[in-house]
Image (cartoon, helix red, strand yellow):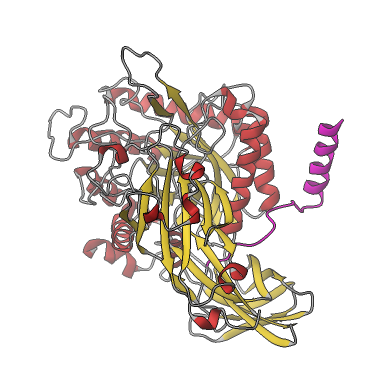
């Protein structure tokens, strides 16, 4: 039947090593000699649709006119979450459609006469479901809150030069059993206890579902024939590296491509031409993680130049892509970067801070990276969704190793394992890989966090998602993060690295630190015996309210968090001699969650407060991470001494 034919087709595609991925690329918008960009950050007009069905904006077609003519609007900063900006309690926990609008004047040179300039509107991300109109014409629709989307708006803006171009965005943060992350809307029908039409958003994950336009919105230009996508993979030995490339050009079949790879001094070290090929680099500077080399995060730049004929004119497009040369390999007990064993000593993070919620913020970003390096952290996981491209760029530049996680968190309900969910999950992996495939910092994909992987449908579900991910990108290992029992987890056979979360003496045997050595040792031994794959402790930790002190340690005190860490570390030190390849603390900083009886203004498992000030545990971790880094003999003494001054 039809399903069988589809299965055969998928198998054929997998066999040919080619997966029918997304139709076009998603290169980060950079200024080049042939491309301009205009940032649309700042204040936008904003209106939440408070009608009972949340549908007034569509019924009344708010996108057809300036938003202020539809009713009351307020100013809203972009990028930012809308939840914490105002004093309006109904906006803090608002569920449904909100409307954003910005009017911009485009430079005339983008619009004049010739049809050789393409104008693109791009959103870094908006949570969760977006519909975008320009001058009342719908240009793009996108599902998913953490990945970029864009639209070619050339013909619309060209038809009305000299008048402001009106960008309208309708944004819906509702989560359903088939979204990623999933959720459910519950109507409270008991009229004696709840007002009419009362509903709540249920979620099965422990962080606040912030919403809004969270990342930069830009307009950028390219020629009408342009470089649409570049894919780079690297292999290397000590003395020579190969950089394999593929370039796709859209708009014409008559074009030529020339490529040059430059080192950090700007010297050309290799050249090539054509849409696919291999560049040979002698005595390459490899991309090394922070604390593994005195010059971590080394990047070359690959300059791609295209020339093409169109409309009787010669067009040129230039795009420069940073390239790190590095390899990743997983054995049954080790994780190798450039052939050397790598031990993850790092953190889990969140995109979360006061007032701005999940909005991108440069001062916060720099503070976080300075804290990471002070801590001696060499890695983090993008728990529990892809982070901003600006964050990923810094990971590439600073040598911070990343486990890149999709928004597959809270997959708990049986109905979230059906075909509709699976199909969307596959598209999300395509979008994530398209965005981050060329990043040296990304060494592993994570397809989910703490799913109900003991359920029967989880086996087929994760087998499929992982196979699809590997077909899209054969160069990286794939995992998901589990908190299921080792004997019941149905997806674990398909991962390359086992990532386990456990909270002994917190969610289990609360207050009993003495059970940790036995329980943690047993956890590691059971997983290894069953799968013979390297293991990362991908979460562990305890809440501590800064300033609460207790000795002997009691739960929620800074001392208890310290004591728990030390118990875990004692076991890590035994097992990292064998097959444990990493430890990631939960969490880097305190973060906001839904309100609940176990959450005091959010989750307090941070080693830093939400304002990025250290708790006692931060110093315990810092001492440990620098000690582990210094055991690694390849470090020059200069770095070892930095530990004293940092």
User: Which residue occupies the foreground of this view, 581 or 151?
Assistant: 151
62 to the left or right of 353: right
Above or below, 185 relative to 371: above
The magenta stretch spans residue 12: yes
User: Is residue 90 something that shows in the picture?
Assistant: yes
Q: Is residue 210 above or below residue 52?
A: below
Point out residue 112 in the picture as x, y percentages from the top left corner: 58, 82
Q: Is residue 283 visible?
A: no
Q: Which residues are magenta?
A: 1-28
Query: Quadrant of residue 113 in the image?
Result: bottom right
Exactly how many numbered labels are in the figure? 0
- The foreground one among 66 and 265 is 66
Is 491 left or right of 537, judged from the image as shown? right
Q: Identify the residue at image location x=69%, y=76%.
A: 225
**Up/down of 114 relative to 507, above or below:** below
Tell me which corner region of the image, top left, top right, bottom left or bottom right, holds residue 455. Answer: top right
Q: Where does the image place residue 183, in percent across and percent down from the top left?
A: 48, 31
**Residue 148: x %, y % from top left:** 53, 56
> Which residue is located at x 67 percent, y 61 percent?
24
Which residue is located at x 43 percent, y 71 percent? 295
Question: Does the magenta segment cover residue 23?
Answer: yes
Q: Position of residue 460 (x, y in %)?
A: 68, 30
In this view, 249 is above or below 510:
below
Q: Quadrant of the N terminus?
A: top right
Closer to us: 49 or 128: 49
Residue 563 left/right relative to 549: right
For the C terminus, the quadrant is: bottom left
């Amino acid at each position: 039947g039809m399903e069988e034919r589809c299965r055969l087709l998928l198998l054929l595609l997998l066999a040919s090593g080619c997966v029918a991925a997304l139709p076009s690329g998603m290169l980060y918008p950079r200024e080049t000699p042939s491309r301009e960009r205009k940032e649309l950050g700042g204040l936008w007009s904003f209106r939440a649709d408070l009608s009972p069905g949340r549908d007034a904006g569509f019924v009344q077609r708010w996108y057809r006119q300036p938003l202020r003519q539809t009713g009351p609007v307020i100013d809203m900063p972009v990028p930012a979450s809308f939840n914490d900006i105002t004093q309006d309690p109904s906006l803090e926990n608002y569920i449904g459609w909100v409307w954003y609008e910005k009017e911009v004047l485009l430079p005339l040179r983008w619009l004049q006469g010739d049809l050789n300039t393409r104008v693109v509107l791009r959103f870094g991300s908006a949570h969760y479901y977006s519909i975008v109109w320009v001058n009342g014409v719908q240009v793009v629709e996108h599902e998913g809150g953490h990945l970029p989307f864009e639209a070619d708006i050339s013909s619309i803006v060209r038809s009305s030069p000299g008048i402001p171009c009106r960008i309208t965005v309708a944004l819906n943060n509702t989560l359903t059993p088939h979204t990623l992350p999933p959720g459910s809307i519950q109507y409270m029908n008991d009229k004696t206890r709840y007002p009419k039409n009362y509903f709540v958003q249920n979620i099965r994950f422990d962080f606040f579902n912030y919403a809004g336009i969270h990342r930069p919105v830009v307009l950028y230009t390219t020629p009408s024939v342009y470089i649409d996508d570049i894919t780079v993979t690297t292999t290397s030995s000590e003395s020579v590296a190969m950089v394999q490339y593929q370039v796709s050009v859209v708009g014409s079949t008559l074009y030529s491509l020339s490529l040059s790879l430059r080192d950090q001094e700007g010297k050309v070290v290799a050249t090539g031409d054509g849409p696919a090929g291999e560049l040979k680099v002698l005595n390459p500077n490899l991309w090394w993680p922070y604390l593994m080399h005195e010059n971590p995060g080394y990047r070359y730049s690959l300059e791609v130049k295209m020339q093409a004929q169109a409309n009787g004119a010669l067009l040129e497009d230039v795009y420069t892509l940073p390239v790190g040369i590095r390899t990743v390999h997983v054995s049954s007990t080790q994780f190798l970067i450039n052939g050397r064993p790598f031990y993850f000593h790092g953190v889990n993070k969140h995109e979360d801070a006061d007032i701005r919620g999940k909005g991108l913020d440069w001062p916060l970003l720099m503070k976080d990276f300075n804290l990471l390096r002070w801590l001696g952290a060499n890695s983090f996981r993008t728990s529990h969704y892809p982070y901003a491209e600006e964050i990923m760029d810094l990971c590439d530049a600073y040598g911070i190793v990343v486990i890149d996680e999709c928004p597959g968190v809270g997959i708990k309900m049986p109905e979230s394992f059906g075909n509709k969910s699976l199909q969307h999950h596959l598209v999300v992996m395509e979008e994530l890989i398209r965005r981050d495939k060329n990043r040296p910092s990304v060494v592993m994909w994570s397809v989910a966090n703490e799913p109900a992987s003991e359920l029967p449908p989880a086996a087929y579900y994760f087998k499929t998602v992982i196979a699809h991910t590997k077909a899209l990108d054969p160069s990286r290992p794939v995992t998901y993060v589990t908190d299921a029992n080792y004997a019941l987890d149905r997806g674990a056979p398909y991962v390359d690295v086992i990532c386990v979360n456990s909270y002994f003496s917190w969610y289990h045997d609360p207050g009993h630190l003495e059970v940790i050595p036995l329980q943690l040792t047993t956890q590691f031994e059971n997983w290894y015996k069953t799968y013979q794959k390297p293991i990362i402790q991908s979460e562990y930790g305890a809440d501590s309210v800064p300033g609460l002190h207790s000795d002997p340690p009691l739960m929620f005190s800074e001392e208890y968090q310290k004591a728990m860490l030390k118990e875990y570390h004692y076991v890590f030190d035994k097992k990292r001699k064998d097959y444990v390849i990493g430890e990631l603390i939960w969490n880097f900083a305190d973060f906001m969650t839904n309100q609940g009886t176990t959450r005091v203004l959010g989750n307090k498992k941070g080693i830093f407060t939400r304002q990025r000030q250290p708790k006692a545990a931060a110093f315990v971790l810092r001492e440990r991470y620098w000690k582990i880094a210094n055991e690694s003999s390849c470090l020059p003494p200069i770095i070892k001494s930095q530990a004293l001054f940092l």
